[in-house]
Image (spheres, helix red, strand yellow):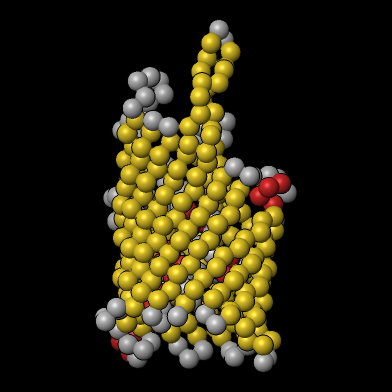
């Protein structure tokens, strides 16, 4: 137990310490900020405690909960135009657990314009596709401590522009009797960036040679659980700003009806904004979540509702419904 405690303390210091990132470039949008599943969002988007393969997007160590095989799928839409999906699979091996995952945000049929006689006219359409591929491996140090690593491949396609990059995530989960701790560090290779190429012949619109940084994301989450009640808390630090966001959640089961779980939470996350000078800034979005989960013999159905506490947000963003499904056996 002393060794376990020392590892947890070391990882906590690394995750929330003053780690510098001196790259003077814009940060790449992290798809996991949208949410990894309805089951996670309904508890305030507390990550690292999922019981299905969706944990590969949260903390690679959390897939230790895979018994033999687990799969998960999640889909939602924004403003009836942008579609978001993820799918994950984890499988227990003779030693450890291996996981695979794909996460995608896409928009089809965006209009291209060009200037003719001082007017902007339509000049065809193009698609936007932002995809994250993950492969993870997890091993257990003991009954209490579980460690995981994930390799990330980033891919962006938008008309003539292509962007590619790679990075690595590290994670650990401490599984106690009543208290669980999840520690994750995403994009630990701070020198790795998204590199863009562009086949557009117009030099004024060409993005060839541009780069975006992959922000270091450090997360520590804690769960205190009793037989029918779970309390959650999480702090997250994103990128070079060194700012924190906070999340809280609770779930409860009715005695003797353990297949149904009710949840609520408070969620904070960063949203990138572009001002009139074309400079990108970060804004913290705050929201409240509620939801319910149903576990039918290893098949999990989750629903979450999110209400944004920002009256200036688009009406389509002020409230959202989420659904996801998971399978474990």
Q: Extreme left residue here?
A: 95
Residue sitting at x 31%, y 55%: 167
Residue sitting at x 36%, y 64%: 100
Residue 79's spot in the image, x, y percent?
Answer: 64, 44
Residue sitting at x 61%, y 54%: 285
Left or right of 218: which side holds 194? left
Seen in the picture, residue 191 relative to 287 is either above or below; the reply is above
Specify whether residue 44 is in view.
no
Q: Quadrant of the N terminus?
A: bottom left
Seen in the picture, residue 121 relative to 178 is either above or below; the reply is above
Q: Image quarter for residue 185? A: bottom left
Residue 123's spot in the image, x, y percent?
Answer: 51, 21
Q: Image quarter for residue 288? A: bottom right
Residue 23's spot in the image, x, y percent?
Answer: 34, 45
Q: Quadrant of the C terminus?
A: bottom left
Seen in the picture, residue 154 relative to 99 is either above or below; the reply is above
Residue 171's spot in the image, x, y percent?
Answer: 37, 70
Q: Nearer the viewer, residue 38 or 90?
A: 90
Q: Image quarter for residue 176? A: bottom left
């Amino acid at each position: 137990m002393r060794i376990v405690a020392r590892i947890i303390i070391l990882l906590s210091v690394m995750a929330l310490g003053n780690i510098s990132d001196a790259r003077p470039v814009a940060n790449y949008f992290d798809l996991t900020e949208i949410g990894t599943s309805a089951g996670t969002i309904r508890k305030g988007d507390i990550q690292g405690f999922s019981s299905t393969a969706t944990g590969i997007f949260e903390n690679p160590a959390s897939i230790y909960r895979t018994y033999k095989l687990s799969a998960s799928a999640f889909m939602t839409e924004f403003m009836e135009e942008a579609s978001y999906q993820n799918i994950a699979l984890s499988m227990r091996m003779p030693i450890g657990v291996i996981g695979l995952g794909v996460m995608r945000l896409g928009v089809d049929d965006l209009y291209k314009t060009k200037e003719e006689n001082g007017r902007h006219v339509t000049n065809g359409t193009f698609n936007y596709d932002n995809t994250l591929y993950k492969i993870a491996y997890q091993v257990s140090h003991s009954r209490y401590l579980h460690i995981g690593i994930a390799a990330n491949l980033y891919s962006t396609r938008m008309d003539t522009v292509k962007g590619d990059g790679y990075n690595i995530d590290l994670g650990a989960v401490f599984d106690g009797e009543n208290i669980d701790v999840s520690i994750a560090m995403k994009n630990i290779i701070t020198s790795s960036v998204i590199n863009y190429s562009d086949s557009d012949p117009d030099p004024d619109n060409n993005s060839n040679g541009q780069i975006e940084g992959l922000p270091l994301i450090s997360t520590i989450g804690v769960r205190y659980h009793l037989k029918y009640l779970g309390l959650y808390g999480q702090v997250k630090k994103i990128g070079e700003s060194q700012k924190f966001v906070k999340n809280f959640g609770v779930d409860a089961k009715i005695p003797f009806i353990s297949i149904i779980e009710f949840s609520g939470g408070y969620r904070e996350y960063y949203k990138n904004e572009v001002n009139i000078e074309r400079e990108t800034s970060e804004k913290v979005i705050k929201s409240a979540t509620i939801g319910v989960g149903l576990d039918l013999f290893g098949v999990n159905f989750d629903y979450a509702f999110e209400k944004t506490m920002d009256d200036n947000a688009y009406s389509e963003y002020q409230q959202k419904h989420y659904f996801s499904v998971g399978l474990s056996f």
